Image (cartoon, rainbow, N blue to C red):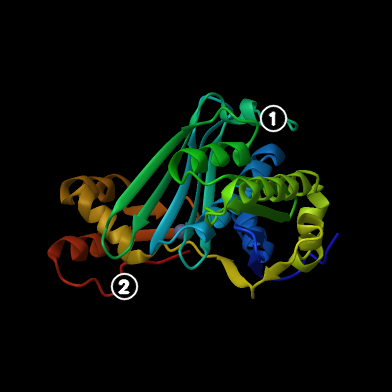
């Protein structure tokens, strides 16, 4: 297995002379930092790691400026799973799950007959797009392949793995080819099938190898062009001012009630577990409309 140290990396590649592109991600430290925040049962952790790898690969194929969210909701042992990736590859994720999780729980046991929502939020325009697919595949990969088939109409293949402190994935996508008659179309079909076969036969350990090692296994005789890597980092994006906004939207009456009952208002970010605490003075500043000097005290 490859050296596990290092920053998360996303690598893009093209198959020369064929309308196929791909991405390989090794989440590296982004995954190690994310899983350190919140210990999960092994089966849930593996699902979370694969979903984070998937959201990065999905983000890599889309043009957007904002945030991409994959959200599972189901009736299985995992009731909710959210993984997010920004256009500049900052990731965060969280899962809610039942008390008892069998260590070898499979995908359908974990997510039940739920659904997967793919949401793109634009930072600047405030625009929002959402696509939903049923969770009826054998894993996140097949679910997302169904998503691509219905929304982008591009044949797409995904392989994902998460094992302990490593998580990685690879995506292949067939782009619309140039017109060239039946013979060309048949040849492109063959090339695509061969690439998919190669990707499908990779072991989980191979998916964790450096892209330079992995790519010849997938590309075979084909000439693949590999581009420079992009960092992928764990960064939550929560902040004191966002929590302040959330409290303002709750309203003065409700927040003052909490102060009366509990002495302070404590809000924990569910993604990174950072605590934001507001005492009576902070709360009055929030609702006086004056800029609060130091409303937050992460502890
Ligand atoms: Zn946070």
User: Is 99 placed above or below 244 here?
Assistant: above
**Residue found at x 53% / y 57%:** 178
Residue 287 appears at what percent x and percent y? 16, 60
Q: Which mark is residue 256?
A: none
Whether 117 is drawn above or below 202: the answer is above
Residue 272 seen in this snapshot: no
Q: Is residue 76 left or right of residue 247?
A: right
Task: Tell me residue 116's x, y (percent).
Answer: 48, 36
**Element under disc 1:** loop
Disc marking residue 294: 2
Residue carrying label 1: 106
The quadrant the N terminus occupies is bottom right
Q: Within 10 angstroms of label 2, few (less than 14), some, or many (20 or more) residues? A: few
Whole-percent x, y for residue 14 in the image: 64, 64
On screen, 222 above or below 263?
below
Is the residue at mark 2 in contact range of ligand 1, meaning its CB lies under 8 Å from it?
no
Relative depth, front residue between 266 and 30:
30
Q: Residue at x 56, y 34 (%)?
A: 97
On whether ligand 1 comes within 8 Å of the CB at mark 1, the answer is no
Judging from the image, what secondary structure is the residue with disc 2 in?
A: loop
Asked if residue 146 lies left or right of residue 237, the reply is right
Mark 1 or mark 2: name the one nearer the start of the chain. 1
Residue at figure coordinates x 31%, y 67% from the top left? 295
Residue 68 x/y as whole percent: 44, 54
Q: Nearer the viewer, residue 11 or 21?
A: 21
């Amino acid at each position: 297995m490859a050296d596990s140290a290092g920053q998360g990396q996303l690598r893009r590649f093209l198959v020369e002379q064929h309308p196929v592109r791909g991405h390989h991600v090794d989440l590296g430290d982004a995954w190690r930092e994310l899983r350190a925040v919140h210990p999960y049962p092994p089966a849930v952790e593996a699902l979370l790691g694969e979903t984070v790898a998937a959201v990065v690969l999905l983000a890599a194929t889309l043009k957007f400026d904002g945030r991409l969210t994959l959200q599972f909701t189901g009736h299985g042992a995992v009731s909710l799973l959210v993984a997010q990736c920004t256009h500049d590859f900052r990731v965060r994720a969280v899962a809610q799950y039942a008390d008892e999780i069998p260590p070898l729980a499979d995908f359908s046991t974990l997510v039940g007959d739920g659904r997967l929502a793919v949401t793109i939020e634009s930072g600047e325009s405030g625009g929002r797009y959402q696509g939903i697919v049923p969770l009826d595949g054998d894993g996140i990969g097949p679910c997302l392949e169904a998503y691509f088939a219905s929304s982008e109409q591009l044949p797409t293949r995904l392989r994902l793995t998460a094992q302990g402190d490593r998580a990685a994935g690879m995506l292949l996508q067939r782009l619309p080819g140039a017109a060239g008659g039946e013979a060309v179309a048949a040849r492109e079909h063959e090339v695509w099938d061969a690439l998919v076969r190669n990707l499908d036969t990779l072991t989980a350990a191979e998916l964790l190898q450096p892209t330079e090692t992995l790519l010849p296994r997938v590309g075979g005789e084909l000439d693949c062009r590999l581009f420079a890597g992009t960092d992928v980092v764990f960064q939550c994006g929560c902040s004191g001012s966002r929590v302040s906004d959330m409290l303002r939207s709750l309203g003065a009456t409700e927040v003052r009630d909490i102060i009366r009952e509990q002495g302070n208002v404590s809000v924990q970010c569910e993604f990174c577990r950072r605590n934001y605490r507001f005492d009576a003075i902070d709360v009055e500043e929030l609702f006086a409309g004056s800029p609060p000097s130091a409303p937050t005290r992460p502890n």
